[in-house]
């Protein structure tokens, strides 16, 4: 789906599993046309990227994110109550599916200077994967603890850890998310109707300690905070709306100083 406001493409598709009885027909197939497209895209990017840019991994589509794709969001929430055993089977299937996709990436792309280029624009040391807790933004913490934590920790353990992004409407999950085993960083995203993450930077850094944080910052507010020496360390600031390249370079000199 395309977001009319931003032009971004969503990974969501129209639900295609109306009945759980069809679930047994799902399988991983290396000859599938979409997996073949994936391999071709990796090959094209590898050839073009040499000494020019890094290639990002894909965000995982596992756990309830995967079932959203199969069944739709509303039906998925109902399935947690009505069909928990099938939900568990689907979560397990999604684990193996996402391992296959991620392992293929690392086998063909490898590491960039010993690390992974992540889908939100940062490099991280080691073999890192990208996870999402989006389905739990609309639930209480207890749902995350019952359905979300174990699948994430299971797959993080297979690599050198992972990064999780958190939307503004999911900040109630912060205490749970920060304690996920293998978590290497949190990438904060914004939503209308909430204070920006940049406004909360000091509170969040105090709350999360040494855990690396990544957040957006509008240029004018970043400059003001820089002048006031109010930019806590341990945060990667993605500065938006910079007037031009010269201003960006001048600002970086001030940052280094």
Image (spheres, rainbow, N blue to C red):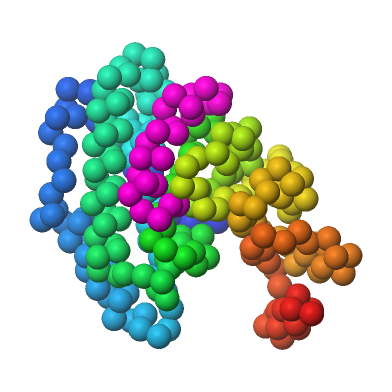
Q: What stretch is highlighted in magenta?
A: 139-162
**Magenta stretch holds residue 148:** yes
In the figure, is residue 114 to the left or right of 24? right
Q: Quadrant of residue 230 in the image?
A: bottom right
**Residue 213 place in picture, x, y as percent:** 62, 54
**Residue 16 place in picture, x, y as percent:** 26, 34
Residue occupying the point 14% across, 30% down: 24
In the figure, is residue 135 to the left or right of 97? right
Residue occupying the point 74% across, 47% down: 206
* Secondary structure mainly formed by the magenta segment: helix
Closer-to-camera residue (108/74): 108
Closer-to-camera residue (143/242): 143
**Residue 249 place in picture, x, y as percent:** 70, 83
**Magenta stretch holds residue 195:** no
Residue occupying the point 71% across, 43% down: 207
- Residue 106, compared with residue 73, is above or below; it is below
Residue projecting furthest to the top: 82
Residue 10 visible within the image:
no
Residue 45 visible within the image:
yes
In the figure, is residue 99 to the left or right of 202? left
Q: Quick one: quadrant of the C terminus?
A: bottom right
In the figure, is residue 91 to the left or right of 235? left
Closer-to-camera residue (209/30): 209
Residue projecting furthest to the left: 31
Residue occupying the point 40% across, 33% down: 150
**Residue 245 place in picture, x, y as percent:** 67, 83
Q: Quadrant of residue 212 in the image?
A: bottom right
């Amino acid at each position: 789906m395309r977001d009319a406001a931003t032009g971004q493409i969503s990974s969501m598709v129209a639900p295609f599993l109306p009945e759980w009885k069809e679930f047994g027909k799902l399988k991983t197939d290396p000859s599938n046309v979409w997996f073949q497209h994936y391999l071709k895209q990796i090959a094209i990017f590898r050839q073009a990227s040499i000494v020019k840019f890094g290639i990002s991994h894909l965000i995982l589509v596992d756990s309830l994110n995967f079932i959203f794709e199969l069944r739709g969001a509303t039906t998925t929430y109902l399935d947690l109550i009505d069909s928990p055993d099938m939900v568990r089977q689907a979560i397990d299937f999604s684990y193996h599916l996402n391992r296959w996709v991620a392992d293929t990436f690392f086998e063909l792309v490898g590491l960039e200077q010993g690390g992974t280029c992540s889908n939100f624009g940062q490099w991280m040391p080691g073999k890192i994967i990208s996870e999402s807790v989006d389905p739990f933004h609309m639930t209480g913490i207890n749902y995350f603890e019952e359905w979300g934590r174990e699948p994430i920790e299971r797959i993080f353990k297979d690599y050198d850890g992972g990064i999780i992004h958190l939307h503004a409407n999911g900040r109630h999950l912060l205490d749970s998310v920060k304690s996920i085993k293998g978590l290497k960083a949190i990438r904060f995203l914004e939503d209308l109707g909430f204070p920006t993450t940049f406004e909360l930077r000091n509170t969040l850094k105090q709350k999360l300690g040494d855990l690396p944080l990544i957040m957006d910052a509008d240029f004018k507010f970043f400059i003001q905070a820089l002048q006031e020496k109010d930019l806590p360390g341990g945060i990667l600031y993605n500065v938006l709306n910079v007037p031009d390249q010269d201003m960006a370079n001048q600002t970086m000199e001030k940052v280094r100083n």
